[in-house]
Image (cartoon, rainbow, N blue to C red):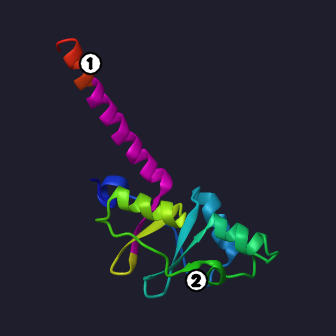
Amino acid sequence: MRRIIPDVVKDQSIHTLPPDSTALEAAKMMANRDVGAILVVGKDGRLAGILTERDITRRIVANGLDPKKATVAEIMTHNPDTLSPDNTEAEALEIMRVRRYRHLPVTVDGKAVAMVSVRDLYEVMKVELEESIRETEAFVFGDRYGA
């Protein structure tokens, strides 16, 4: 089994904002950095929440709120579920499947060290599946053709 760090997420820079940032600042950060979620970090450096594109759509746009006035703290998911670096990709996928998440923060002692996405996990699982197929084909066809 592969671990979240270093097997799934390597040398990743995480994108964070303080809770008093506006929803507009968060949306601009997501657009500029081409990410679907940011982590909200308190003054103590500890993870306070997560804010996703879905949160902005459902909690700001759908409710007609002003993104220049609404703060990240008002719309983020407080105290989100997290992974540890030692969790496996299977554990991460199961949490994401059951809870319908697309992003999960990775923390150590309450501080964010990475963010894993469904896309990250897909890439790892795709490679594993391709390797398994190659091994199976080598076994099946190797025996068949006397190799």
Crowding at dot 2, Cα within 10 Å, few <14 / some 14-19 / many 20+, comes out as many
In the rendered structure, the answer to whether residue 142 lies left or right of residue 5 reads: left
Determine if the magenta segment contains residue 133.
yes
Q: Residue extending furthest left?
A: 146
Instruction: Compare residues 120 and 70 and report the one nearer the observer.
Output: 120
- The amino acid type of the residue labelled 2 equals Pro
Instruction: Compare residues 76 and 96 and report the one nearer the observer.
Output: 96
Q: Is residue 115 above or below residue 72?
A: above
Q: Is residue 100 above or below residue 118?
A: below
Element type at mark 1: helix
Q: Which residues are magenta?
A: 112-137
- The amino acid type of the residue labelled 1 equals Phe
In the rendered structure, the answer to whether residue 142 lies left or right of residue 122 reads: left
Q: Residue extending furthest bottom?
A: 44
Work out whether residue 13 can be spotted.
Answer: no
Give the residue number, with chain letter if any, for mark 1: 141
Instruction: Compare residues 115 and 99 and report the one nearer the observer.
Output: 99
Q: Give the Cα separation between the discs numbered 1 and 2.
A: 58 Å
Give the residue number, with chain letter if any, for mark 2: 19
Q: Position of residue 66 (x, y in %)?
A: 79, 77
Q: Residue at x 28, y 29 (%)?
A: 136
In the rendered structure, the answer to whether residue 59 lies left or right of residue 51 reads: right
For the residues carrying marks 1 and 2, which lies nearer the camera in this image? 1
Q: Position of residue 12 (x, y in %)?
A: 41, 59
Work out whether residue 100 can be spotted.
Answer: yes
Determine if the magenta segment contains residue 106.
no
Q: Is residue 49 above or below residue 134?
A: below
